[in-house]
Image (cartoon, helix red, strand yellow):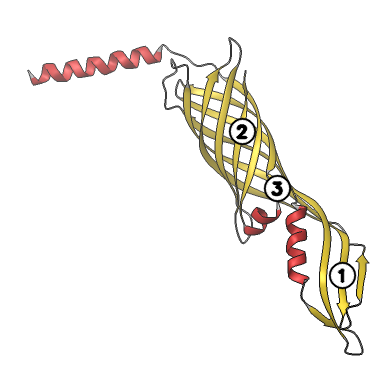
């Protein structure tokens, strides 16, 4: 009796396996774009705006529920000029300095115009296991990848003004032209993990939405951001 139950259970799972084996999933190409939310380090989070991204990837299916994405992408984050100017002003206002004769001056205002960006060109591959069966109209998947990232950061101090007054209340303002542009390039490995969904859009296209937590293994402290993207599947 017990042997009969085991054989029935085995037959049940063999039937399921045979049914799934007949279901195939074609390889697909995806183009998607979205936003990047800076997380770490603090200077990245505090002094850069929400980034923009453009990605293309081709997914090769090893089975109906396992895909191997091969991708290339571009991320760019621009400098938050207002945040830099605000901290520059807060740092200087109220400070006292002295001229060559020992006369005190108090800084009452300061402005700074800065510009720049942090960009990343990346290539990589990953693993995408699907939680839902291939017959479901709504596809839910997990996603992890590794990447090689070509990083470039630029910064330009475009100058500003410093306003100060003497002991008698006389107001002075000085301008300065700024400094030379700074550029830094480096190549770093990275990784990402997250999840997403696919929705049917028609006979030829599907929609894809995904969220990933990205880590780039930079010196001293890793650079991290959250990527929220949407796009089309061909």
Check residue 229 in the rendering and tell me which mark sits there, or answer none: 2
Q: Looking at the image, which residue is at 29% across and 13% down?
A: 15
| Residue 30, percent from left and from top | 62, 24
Check residue 24 in the rendering and tell me which mark sits there, or answer none: none
Q: Looking at the image, which residue is at 55% across and 39% down?
A: 212
Q: Earlier in the sequence, mark 1 or mark 2?
A: 1
Instruction: State how far apart marks 1 and 2 are (Cα).
Output: 44 Å
| Residue 174, percent from left and from top | 92, 69
Left or right: where 80 falls relative to 45: right
- Relative to 11, does residue 164 appear above or below in the rendering? below
Residue 144 appears anywhere in the view = yes
Could you tell me which secondary element the residue under label 2 belongs to? strand
Instruction: State how far apart marks 3 and 1 are (Cα).
Output: 28 Å
Residue that protrudes farthest toward the bottom in the picture: 101
Could you tell me which secondary element the residue under label 3 belongs to? loop
- Relative to 203, does residue 151 appear above or below in the rendering? below
* Residue underneath mark 3: 49
Q: Looking at the image, which residue is at 82% across and 74% down?
A: 107
* Residue underneath mark 1: 163
Q: Residues within 10 Å of mark 1 (few under 14, many from 20)?
A: some
Q: Quadrant of the C terminus?
A: top right
Along the line of sight, the residue nearer the viewer: 230 or 91: 91
- Mark 2 in CB contact with mark 3 (< 8 angstroms): no
| Residue 69, percent from left and from top | 57, 30
Q: Earlier in the sequence, mark 3 or mark 1?
A: 3
Q: Looking at the image, which residue is at 71% across and 48% down?
A: 151
Along the line of sight, the residue nearer the viewer: 11 or 166: 166
Residue 167 figure quarter:
bottom right
| Residue 109, percent from left and from top | 82, 68
């Amino acid at each position: 009796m017990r042997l009969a139950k085991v054989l029935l259970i085995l037959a049940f799972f063999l039937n399921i396996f045979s049914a799934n084996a007949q279901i195939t999933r074609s390889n697909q190409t995806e183009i998607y774009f979205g936003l990047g939310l800076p997380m770490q380090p603090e200077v990245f989070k505090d002094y850069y705006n929400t980034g923009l991204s453009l990605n293309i990837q081709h997914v090769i299916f090893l089975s109906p529920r396992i895909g191997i994405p091969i991708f290339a992408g571009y991320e760019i984050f621009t400098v938050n000029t207002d945040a830099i100017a605000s901290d520059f002003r807060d740092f200087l206002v109220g400070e006292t300095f002295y001229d060559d004769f020992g006369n005190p001056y108090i800084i009452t205002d300061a402005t700074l115009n800065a510009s720049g960006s942090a960009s990343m060109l990346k290539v990589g591959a990953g693993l995408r296991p699907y939680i839902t069966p291939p017959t479901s109209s709504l596809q839910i998947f997990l996603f992890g990848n590794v990447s090689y990232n070509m990083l470039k950061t630029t910064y330009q101090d475009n100058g500003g003004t410093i306003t100060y007054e003497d002991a008698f209340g006389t107001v002075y303002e000085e301008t300065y032209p700024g400094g030379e542009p700074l550029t830094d390039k480096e190549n770093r490995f990275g990784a990402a993990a997250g999840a997403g969904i696919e929705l049917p859009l028609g006979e030829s296209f599907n929609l894809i939405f995904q969220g990933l937590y990205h880590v780039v293994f930079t010196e001293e402290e890793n650079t991290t951001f959250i990527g929220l993207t949407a796009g089309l599947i061909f």
